[in-house]
Amino acid sequence: MRTITYREAIREALAEEIERDENVFLIGEEVAQYNGAYKVTEGLWKKYGDKRVIDAPISEAGFLGMGIGASMLGLRPVMELMFWSFCYVAMDQLMNNASSVRYMSGGLIHCPIVVRGPANGGTNVGATHSHTPENIFANMPGLKVVCPATPYDAKGLMKSAIRDNDPVYVMESTVLYGQTGEVPDNDEIEGGELIVPLGVADVKRQGDDITLVAHGRAVLTCLEAAAILADEHDIEAEVVDLRSIRPLDQDTILESVRKTGRAIVVEENKPFCGIGAQIAYLIQHEAFDDLDAPVLRLSSIDAPAIYSPPVEKKQLPYPSQIVDKALSIC
Amino acid sequence: MRTITYREAIREALAEEIERDENVFLIGEEVAQYNGAYKVTEGLWKKYGDKRVIDAPISEAGFLGMGIGASMLGLRPVMELMFWSFCYVAMDQLMNNASSVRYMSGGLIHCPIVVRGPANGGTNVGATHSHTPENIFANMPGLKVVCPATPYDAKGLMKSAIRDNDPVYVMESTVLYGQTGEVPDNDEIEGGELIVPLGVADVKRQGDDITLVAHGRAVLTCLEAAAILADEHDIEAEVVDLRSIRPLDQDTILESVRKTGRAIVVEENKPFCGIGAQIAYLIQHEAFDDLDAPVLRLSSIDAPAIYSPPVEKKQLPYPSQIVDKALSIC
Amino acid sequence: MATATAKSSTGSAEFADDPVNRDLDTDTKIGFYRAMVRIRHFEQTALKHYQQEKMGGFLHLYIGQEAVAVGTISLCGDNDHIITAYRDHGHALAVGMSMEECMAELFGKRTGCSKGKGGSMHFFAPDKNYWGGHGIVGGQTPLGAGLAFALKYKGLKGACLCYLGDGAVNQGAYHESLNLAALWNLPVIYIIENNMYSMGTSQARSSAYPSCLAERAEGYGMNWDLFNGESVYEIRAKLKPHLDRAHDDHLPSILEIATYRYYGHSVADANAKKYRSKEEIEKYQNEHDPIKVWENILIDEGVFEADDAKEINRAAKDEADASARYADNSPLPDVSEITDDVYYEVDKGTEAGRTGRHFFND
Amino acid sequence: MATATAKSSTGSAEFADDPVNRDLDTDTKIGFYRAMVRIRHFEQTALKHYQQEKMGGFLHLYIGQEAVAVGTISLCGDNDHIITAYRDHGHALAVGMSMEECMAELFGKRTGCSKGKGGSMHFFAPDKNYWGGHGIVGGQTPLGAGLAFALKYKGLKGACLCYLGDGAVNQGAYHESLNLAALWNLPVIYIIENNMYSMGTSQARSSAYPSCLAERAEGYGMNWDLFNGESVYEIRAKLKPHLDRAHDDHLPSILEIATYRYYGHSVADANAKKYRSKEEIEKYQNEHDPIKVWENILIDEGVFEADDAKEINRAAKDEADASARYADNSPLPDVSEITDDVYYEVDKGTEAGRTGRHFFND
Ligand SMILES: Cc1ncc(C[n+]2csc(CCOP(=O)(O)OP(=O)(O)O)c2C)c(N)n1
Ligand SMILES: Cc1ncc(C[n+]2csc(CCOP(=O)(O)OP(=O)(O)O)c2C)c(N)n1
Ligand SMILES: [Mg+2]
Ligand SMILES: [Mg+2]
């Protein structure tokens, strides 16, 4: 199989979907002529032109709302937020119009949009640029939230997101853009296309002793921790990558926890009402009698993102913390 | 003691704080000449004039941001959102500037603002007007979130919020505005003022069999359910009113659960990553061995708020649902 | 760029000869009358039932502004689309929605246009190019630009009429929409229905402006106009060139139409008579009422007689009453239907709708 | 209302005789030179250390725009306040912040002006009336209105200078701020530092406008001006009447100042030479560089000689180097300090800070 970057994987998904469906177009700040602030859309404007790849002014409420309106008439905009952190200036469009126009119209209107961009800390860009709003959007029924951790998933999930007829918010990571991974060529795949459905978690590592549940970059952190646990402590951790936050693959989580009896939810989200809280609630609710210990979680340290580069590293979960937590209940 | 409405209780708090501190002023849409969309500020403009009670254009990002800027220079704006549902058009000001200006300045700048207004469903105003964003704001470190359930608490918490030197978001309820309750006259109180500190929960009903944790109007629903449980099922429920979501009085919750061994978190919040998830996580984490059953929760039905008046009643938690849940684990 | 005169009750006649008006046939002219009258009776009937607690939430009445929706929408063709704010009953009936589906929506019934899920602020009829009904002030303005964008993207010759209030012009999303519309030449016409108040706040207390609100268009190099909204003739005449430019050259515009609402901001607005004088309201009703203005024009022109007008009113009232009976007799949505219409994929039972958990009740 | 000429490299001299300039003493004039030179050397030194990975995140250089911060802030008195966006080093030094605290902030050190918590985009010095340093485009514009509001509320004679970029004018919050400022007469002066690009997007590709961006002020009945930002004299002369009106009558303005940035949008902007031609950049550097322009003026006036200028440059470079050593040798914040500076009440150990749980680590 080929090895490509997470960035390239997303780009392939975008290009394939632009070619497949004439209603698909990309819009966002600097996505066209500049090739994208993080080069995800590199080359696409050159290839597909002004109609399909559009540079927007710094007017997130304006152009995201515009995309929502256009989607009501059948277009399928894929809209880049240069950072998901900028969602707050467009929050009404994202939280009200996109989520509820279908509901408030009794199902008459659909909103097949994708909003995508990076949502992560860890790059020293400070409090206002390091938000991870997956919990906020997943709280709102009508929305779907996806957080791919690998190039394979990034490509497959993006294609599903674009074909989905509901609003899907894809949260990528600037830290992951350069990571490489195996992604099959289309002609290696049955059906000729890489599709990863929303709502299906992926067990990224098998293990019997403890379950680590994560999404996005935290999945890689968990895999590192799992390697240490196995090597140094003879503990086999199973790593469940949620991939999509809503819809959520609850069954895969529970199956794992029923086997291991222990769980830690690891996230780069802030802790209060974060994804970890929700998953922990679910696990104790659905698998109370299978639990040998309380469900633990590890989130980013509960403060706005600090700038100081060496210190910010410690604000986000790192492997030895997971190891310590695991040892405390294994 | 006097009996006054929740609305009057808030109004008293506002008036007292305007009189106490010349830096306190009110601003919001229709708060002055119109006396407030829900009459909370009735009479205040007449009494305190243009300087202290200000009508704003429909520019939430503008006037809330303006208040934040003014607070940096020492003013103490109390800003009304006609509905908290309109926070999304001002979300960047509320989530970035208010929460993080202190942090990003290394503690040099303070932001002593209060943003207040109703945040509730149940009045048939549909999806866009029925948001309960307490979980969203409490997720962000730097912010404080308060949800009073009674006139007494509404007055006391509002005064604490205005004196607090951090941004405090007070979420009231249009359903509660007309509810009455006992609120002492100032001359009945030692110190001459009613102050309810943030971060202190209130056990609104004692009981040994099960703990019901709630905030805002759900507290009243729990009290009704507790009465039914006692009358009809001989179950004594303890009702813990969180009052403030962040800071959170974890000790009072845990003390209760350690006694009862069972807990249901009841909220009008949406379930995914809502307050219920966070409290349930906390309880199972801190009191795992004291639990005789999984922590349950009851949230509003997971869809945008429906309009249809008789049906919306059923979208929000009601007493018999709590009773049924309680019976399932007692 | 604009004629800055408004509220001139006499000006109407001069527009009768405008090319867009002069060839109107009798049926069409009477049709405009009927359309306005139907809006008024629909709302008066709704109000009565609101007071009888047959509905809840807000009820923002359009009464007094009828000529704006009827006049502007009368020029719309197959590829012209409509979107507005929460004061949306007038536009809904003007695009051809039935009183029954609208009234049933107000009653919160399953037979409502939005199955009782949207209520007064959220009427929709995509099949009639009507995209609602939106509750957040200014929130519909980027959607309007988006409808226009989609028309242009698809190569259709059409425009979007996007209505907003005089108070809504101070929302950030509107400003962003104006810049996008002007920058990209999107065929959207923003129509400010200036009824002089946003709730209890007069225009002068909420907006800073040079001569009028539409003039802010200048800052984006956009076309604009300001005119009186009491006469269907004038509205049509003044809209036409902007609609043509939108159709032919994808040019956006802002049109500010002076109008007035007779009732409070919404039915719950107990102050409706405090922030405006009784005289102000009565002057409007007596001298500028769009239905009376049109009725007089039609009588003057000999198109119909006073009795015909009465008959049309009676029929509209009957229709409204019947719609209320229909609404009253319709079933409520079932509680189990609360989670329908949230996700397309779940509703349609697609593979994507069956994969993973979508709802978290429990 | 405005002189719509910009980028005229010759116009500078005529402003030397303006009342605001004509009595400037030698030290003050040299002080302006030193201030600009210090900004440039500070940033060049920062850039070097950025490339050596002594810092992370963004680094938006102000080089090329120095006269704007120095010229405008030179007119500020005790009750005038400053707030800007993320391209904030120039304003920080111009208000009197030390290179050490600024450089240490870039290095993420505890001795930084924000204790290493804010980084390049978040310099603050409330004691010098400097309110940052804000990362969200346009997000500072309501704060600027708020500072002005507070001045007026307190009865102080002062103004807020609120800077933003040419790309920021299309944010909704800015529009809302303009309306508030004009409606309530808030003494805020919005200064658009128009460097012709928002990242890689030229003004023409991001904004629709009549003659310029400041002209949008007309839509709010506000004063405005457009002028060249390469000469300190011109900037001072053109700002003065607006500052006076803010001080005397609480009147807001928009001033658009034509300028240019030499480097990329931020250091990470690999495209900096793709969306602009080499010629464009060089023409600017050769003909319009604000430091050279001012140096030439001072030499022409006989205020100093070329050698003095060199000496000032050398001293600034030394100061910058020393600040980098200081920064390098300073301690990092401790991990335990991550949760400091979140809540005032917790930091100060007040009763409110000790009641209830504030942090949820675990
Ligand atoms: C963002 C937002 N802020 C406030 C409101 C509450 N609100 C609803 S209508 C309204 C007044 C709007 O006035 P205008 O735009 O003039 O329209 P009109 O009601 O006169 O038709 C207000 C303040 C809202 N729905 N959305
Ligand atoms: C709301 C928001 N959207 C996007 C960005 C990313 N961004 C940062 S600076 C910038 C360009 C701003 O250009 P301009 O206003 O001209 O200022 P300049 O950088 O030229 O000083 C962009 C798009 C942001 N920080 N905030
Ligand atoms: Mg109005
Ligand atoms: Mg710029």
Image (tube, coloured by chain):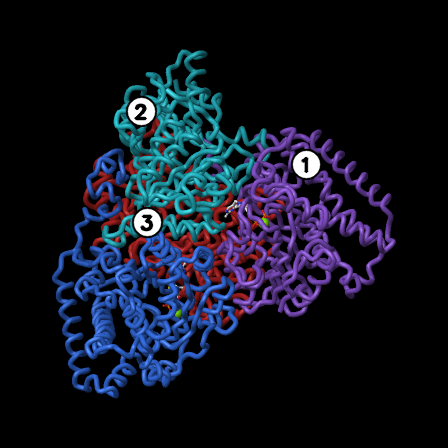
Chain colours: A red, B cyan, C purple, D blue
Res. A306 mark:
none
Q: Closer to the N terminus: mark 2 or mark 3?
A: 3
Q: CA distance from mark 1 to mark 3?
A: 45 Å
Which subunit holds the residue at mark 2?
A: B
From the image, state whether disc 2 or disc 1 is nearer to you. Answer: 2
Contact between marks 1 and 3 (CB within 8 A): the answer is: no
Q: How far from the left and from the top, in percent, is residue A237?
A: 28, 41
Label 1 environment density (alpha carbons within 10 Å; few <14, some 14–19, many ≥20): many
Look at label 3 and name its amino acid.
Answer: Ser
* Image vertical order of residue B7 relative to residue C307, above or below: above
The answer to whether C155 appears left or right of B246 in the picture is right
Give the foreground label among 1 and 3: 3
Note whether residue D85 is visible. no
* Disc 3: which residue: B71
C350 over A37 or under it: above or below:
above
Name which residue lies at 48% across and 61% down: A14
Label 2 near ligand 1 (CB < 8 Å): no
Callout 3 secondary element: helix
CA separation in Å, label 2 and label 1: 49 Å
Q: Which residue has dot 1 on it?
A: C46
Q: Is residue C293 above or below residue B224?
A: below
Query: Label 2's element?
Result: helix
Q: Amino acid at mark 1?
A: Ala
**Which mark, residue B187?**
2
Residue C295 spot, x, y in % from top left: 80, 49
Q: Is residue B306 left or right of residue D202?
A: right
Q: Nearer the viewer, mark 2 or mark 3?
A: 2
Q: Are marks 1 and 3 on the same chain?
A: no
In which quadrant is the N terminus of chain A drawn? bottom left
Find the distance from the CA under tag 2 to the CA under tag 3: 31 Å
- Viewer-closest of A47 and B307: B307
Q: How many marks?
A: 3
